[in-house]
Amino acid sequence: MSDVVLRLSGIVKSFPGVLANDHVDFTLKRGEVHALLGENGAGKTTLMNIAYGIYKPDEGDIYVDNRRVKITSPHRAMEYGIGMIQQHFSLVPSFSVAENITLGLKEFGIFPKMESVKKKIESLSQKFGLDVSADSHIWQLSVGEQQRVEILKLLYMNARIMILDEPTAILTPQETENLFKTIREMVKNGASVIFISHKLKEVLKISDRITVMRHGRMLDTIPTSVADERILARKMVGRDVLLKVSKKPSSPGREILEVENLWSRGDKGQYAIRGVDLKVRSGEILGIAGVEGNGQRELAESIYGLRRYTGRVVIDGEDMLPLDVTSRIRRGVAYIPQDRKGLALCGGLPIYYNFFLKVFDSPNFSFNPYMFNPSYLRRGAEQMVKDYSISTPSVDLEAKYLSGGNMQKVVLAREISGSPKLIIAVHPTRGLDVGAMEFIYKSLLRERNKGVAILLIAGDLEEIFTLSDRVGVLYEGEIVGYSKPDESHIEEIGLMMAGVGSIDA
Ligand SMILES: Nc1ncnc2c1ncn2[C@@H]1O[C@H](COP(=O)(O)OP(=O)(O)O)[C@@H](O)[C@H]1O
Ligand SMILES: [Mg+2]
């Protein structure tokens, strides 16, 4: 066992109402990339926060180099050579790269010798292909660059055990490639890496071993050499799943959505959408790819009428500007928002209420006491639960108790049952297990085949490729170009996502 650098044994951690880690065992060998794979909520971050001293486990032990240790803080973790890059960074925007890297390091005292620090940073940056300048200020950097600063920080501190929590979620395909090169270089230099992800392809590409977690439990650890996507998907979900959804060629009809010179501001007041033009026709799916934070949310909300804008949003020939959300819903706009708990569902209301949230004020309901009859609503809801295979003990259950996948099915069922002309779907499968994902994909394709126009805004390129008939790339609030949605165009799309691509339509 001398090659084991980190061992977590019998880790238990519960939060109110959730057993996030249920007797988890995990070992990291010297010089390996060990992937930790599992759907959102599986308990990956919790386990790693325990190894990094952020959470205290309820039970279980941690061994570093076969010695039992108590890791009571990130600072203590660092003393054992454990470093972690969290999903949300902890850099100070107004400080320079060098200042951020030395921040909190004891040996520097109050006046670090900046010149030698900078030299070391530049040389590490070069050696590991990070391309970061010590003098840049954090606020000037893209999220990808900020991540590289976090990596530099770990390298600077000589971390030997590097935990990367979903590092690729915010990266373009090229940035992901570069990250993988850096990881390989780190391993060559003696580091061991824990790579957290829920993406099968990435895990297969970068890791030596894979541990799969499901519902707080450690399911299995296997060498990557014997794994493939099907095996991993089955372990993650607990049953066989189809990974490819077949799609027949689209036969687009009339124009349903036309957006012209759309401008809209983000929550901080800056322009988040800067002159977007796009068209979606009946029976087609237009995918909008892009790194998160480039205006995705603002685009969807403007079209749906939740956010003020200037420019034109035309739906089926009618300018929507004077119309509020309700009127847009009445004209056949359906919305699957990014934030299903906050915006799409009322967690405290029973499931059957949630199905009818959008139609309560329709003449059918407001003049017809029979239709308000709960048993009538329940019956309708029960049918939807059946049609959409929503797993719940009863339609009276409060929506907040549903799992993510089942919540999303409720949203989907409600939105589709209104027979929309246009569906705006934002990250529709984020956080869902592969089984639920497959279901959502099939449902959206079925609607498209029936002639619904679908605007799909998603961060995951695989999702875009699976569903879209065309793909546009959103970068800093503009559609910077269009491409064909398949793997062979991934480089072109990636470049556009980074803002350096072509402008061809
Ligand atoms: N600080 C916390 N308080 C309460 N519940 C939490 C907290 N952190 C995580 N959880 C819950 O623990 C479970 C596992 O979460 P997490 O470890 O973040 O999963 P993963 O990283 O695999 O997506 C989830 O159900 C999550 O809601
Ligand atoms: Mg996590």
Image (cartoon, rainbow, N blue to C red):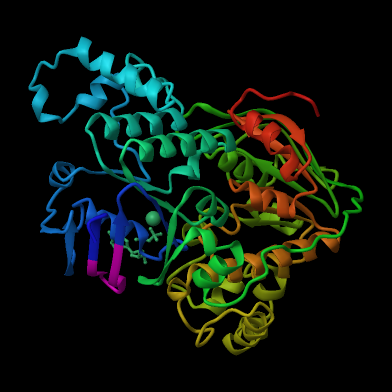
Q: How many marks?
A: 0
Q: Position of residue 263 (x, y in %)?
A: 64, 29
286 within the magenta span: no
Q: Position of residue 117 (x, y in %)?
A: 22, 17
Could you tell me residue 437's position as x and y percent? 61, 65
Secondary structure character of the magenta stretch overall: strand
Most foreground residue, 218 or 400 = 218
* Ligand 1 found in image quarter: bottom left
Quarter of the view holding residue 37: bottom left
Of 455 and 204, which appears nearest the observer?
204
**Could one spot residue 127 in this view of the protein?**
yes
Above or below, comparing residue 448 to residue 140 in the picture: below
Tell whether 291 sits left or right of 422.
left
Q: Which residues are magenta?
A: 9-26
Q: Residue at x 33, y 18 (%)?
A: 123
Q: Residue 98, image x and y in percent?
A: 27, 19
| Quarter placement of the N terminus | bottom left
Q: Residue 182's quadrant in the figure?
A: top left
Above or below, 325 against 367 in this view is above
Which residue is found at the position 72% from the left and 67% from the top?
443
Horizontal side, residue 232 vs residue 326: left or right = left
Q: Is residue 8 left or right of residue 43?
A: left
Report the front residue among 2 and 105: 2
Looking at the picture, tell me which residue is in the foreground, 233 or 418.
Answer: 233
